Image: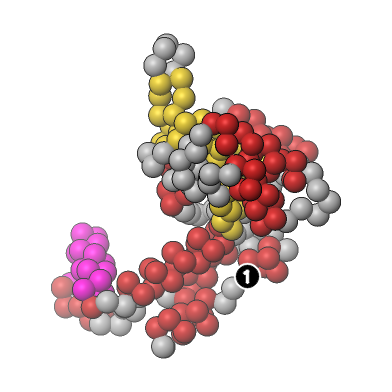
């Protein structure tokens, strides 16, 4: 696979590639010819692990450009951890004709060669050239942050807290290490939402802060403060 070759080269040379994916695309994934006159589908979710490995090789500097008919359709499918699949994702925000996609993409890479290019400016120029759609760009850190905040808010609902405790109860019962009385005693001290330690570990692994200290300045956040703001505790 081309992504695997790029990963090997990034490890060997230290290069930071821009990964360009161009094909038909939609909410289910990317589509292309199967070599037998038909077509085959590559689900978005199957790209997650290869992209994570490539982004890891670049120390979380990979930009992914999805030049598909609906280039932003699959971004939510790429949010699974433990590592971020890219530092930023770029693509058209709606269905687009091939000619408009070509114009926008050509402008994107022309501007990419600027001195000290800024992704916001590049996407703006590409959108103007495409004409009918906007080339959206999304820092992956914002996607991950939004997902964590949403998860925290949902976890505060009483029904979600009951479900969480029930899942833990069933796991402990299956292990058969404790009596029912002891399980209930332990559950009484169980936090009702993910701990700040768990969330901090998740974030630091996602953006490779645990591996590359320089990423702290770029992506570091204090989960203890965030949990306090969201939960009031």
Whole-percent x, y for residue 17 in the image: 70, 41
Query: How many other residues sit within 10 Å of disc 1, few (<14), some (14-19) or many (≥20)?
Result: some
Q: Is residue 215 visible?
A: yes
Return the residue found at the far right. 115
Residue 152, relative to residue 114: is it above or below?
A: below
Residue 43 place in picture, x, y as percent: 41, 36
Residue 63 showing in the rendered view:
no
Name which residue lies at 32% across and 73% down: 155
Please give the name of the residue rendered at 50% of the width and 62% of the height, measured from the top-left corner.
144
- Quadrant the N terminus occupies: top right
The image's colouring method is secondary structure
Q: Main secondary structure of the magenta part?
A: helix
Image quarter where the C terminus lies is bottom left
* Residue pictured at 50% horizontal, 79% vertical: 226
Instruction: Choose top left, top right, bottom left or bottom right for residue 46.
Output: top left
The range drawn in magenta is 159-179
User: Toward the viewer: 55 or 149?
Assistant: 149
Q: Which residue is mark 1?
A: 220
State left or right for residue 204 relative to residue 78. right
Residue nearest the viewer, comparing 55 with 122: 122
Q: Identify whether 22 is placed above or below 15.
A: above
Q: Where in the figure is residue 58, as x and y percent of width and height?
A: 68, 47
Q: Secondary structure under badge 1? A: loop
Q: Residue at x 64, y 43 (%)?
A: 129
| Residue 205 colored in magenta in the image | no
């Amino acid at each position: 696979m081309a992504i695997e070759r790029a990963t090997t080269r990034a490890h060997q040379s230290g290069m930071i590639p821009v990964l360009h994916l161009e094909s038909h695309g939609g909410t289910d994934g990317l589509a292309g010819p199967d070599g037998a006159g038909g077509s085959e589908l590559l689900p978005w979710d199957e790209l997650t692990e290869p992209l994570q490995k490539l982004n890891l090789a670049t120390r979380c500097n990979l930009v992914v450009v999805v030049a598909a008919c609906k280039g932003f359709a699959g971004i939510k499918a790429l949010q699974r951890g433990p590592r971020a699949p890219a530092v930023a994702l770029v693509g058209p925000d709606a269905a687009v004709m091939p000619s408009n996609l070509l114009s926008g993409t050509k402008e994107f890479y022309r501007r990419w060669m600027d001195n000290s290019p800024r992704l916001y400016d590049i996407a703006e120029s590409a959108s103007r050239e495409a004409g009918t759609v906007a080339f959206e760009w999304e820092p992956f850190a914002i996607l991950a942050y939004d997902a964590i905040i949403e998860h925290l808010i949902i976890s505060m609902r009483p029904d979600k807290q009951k479900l969480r405790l029930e899942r833990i109860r069933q796991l402990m019962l299956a292990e058969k290490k404790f009596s029912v009385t002891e399980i209930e005693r332990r559950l009484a001290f169980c936090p009702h939402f993910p701990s700040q330690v768990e969330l901090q570990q998740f974030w630091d692994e996602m953006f490779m802060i645990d591996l590359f200290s320089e990423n702290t300045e770029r992506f570091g956040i204090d989960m203890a403060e965030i949990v306090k703001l969201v939960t009031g505790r």
